[in-house]
Image: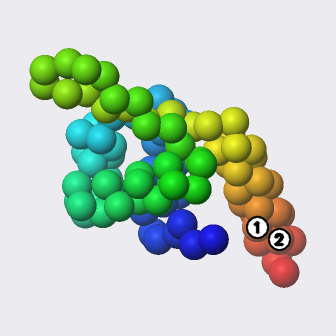
């Protein structure tokens, strides 16, 4: 499973913080384009990390939310990050 690029973790962290609309997500980081964002979101939906909610409004509104699997996935990433910080602190 390859979901990664340099933007994936950033996007996941933003969604975790409650930024769940594509237009708002693009504005969270200079250099993040709509094209890349849409590719990353589609991939994460495909892998079951995110749910896509489309509202029948004009103009259309779309939101992305973490699935239960996505929340567990982020918990694992948090553990890896904590381990990395511990290793860096110990000088290893």
The answer to whether residue 37 shows anywhere in this view is yes
Query: Is residue 75 shown left or right of residue 4?
Result: right
Of all residues, the one furthest to the bottom in this rendering is 92
Instruction: Name the image quarter holding the C terminus.
Output: bottom right
The image's mark for residue 87 is 2
Report which residue position mark 1 lands on.
84
Q: Nearer the viewer, residue 54 or 77?
A: 54
The image's mark for residue 27 is none
Instruction: Name the image quarter holding the N terminus.
Output: bottom right
Label 1: state its secondary structure.
Answer: helix
Q: Nearer the viewer, residue 45 or 87?
A: 45
Q: Residues within 10 Å of mark 2 (few under 14, many from 20)?
A: few
The answer to whether residue 82 shows anywhere in this view is no
Vertical order, 28 against 42 (above or below):
above
Q: Residues within 10 Å of mark 1 (few under 14, many from 20)?
A: few
Q: How is the image coloured?
A: rainbow
For the point 50% across and 49% down, which residue is it? 45
Q: Position of residue 23 (x, y in %)?
A: 24, 39
Query: Is residue 38 shown left or right of residue 73?
Result: left
Of all residues, the one furthest to the top in this rendering is 57
Q: Position of residue 72 (x, y in %)?
A: 74, 44
For the point 53% across and 43% down, which residue is it? 50
Vertical order, 22 against 80 (above or below):
above
| Inter-mark Cα distance, 1 to 2 | 5 Å
Q: Position of residue 88 (x, y in %)?
A: 77, 71
Of all residues, the one furthest to the left in this rendering is 58
Query: Is residue 4 shown left or right of residue 60?
Result: right
């Amino acid at each position: 499973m390859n979901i990664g690029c340099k933007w994936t973790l950033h996007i996941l962290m933003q969604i975790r913080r409650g930024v769940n609309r594509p237009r708002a997500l693009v504005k969270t980081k200079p250099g993040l384009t709509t094209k890349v964002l849409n590719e990353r979101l589609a991939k994460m939906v495909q892998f079951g990390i995110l749910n896509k909610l489309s509202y029948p409004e004009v103009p259309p509104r779309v939101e992305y939310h973490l699935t239960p699997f996505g929340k567990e996935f982020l918990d694992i990433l948090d553990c890896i990050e904590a381990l990395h910080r511990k290793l860096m602190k110990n000088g290893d």
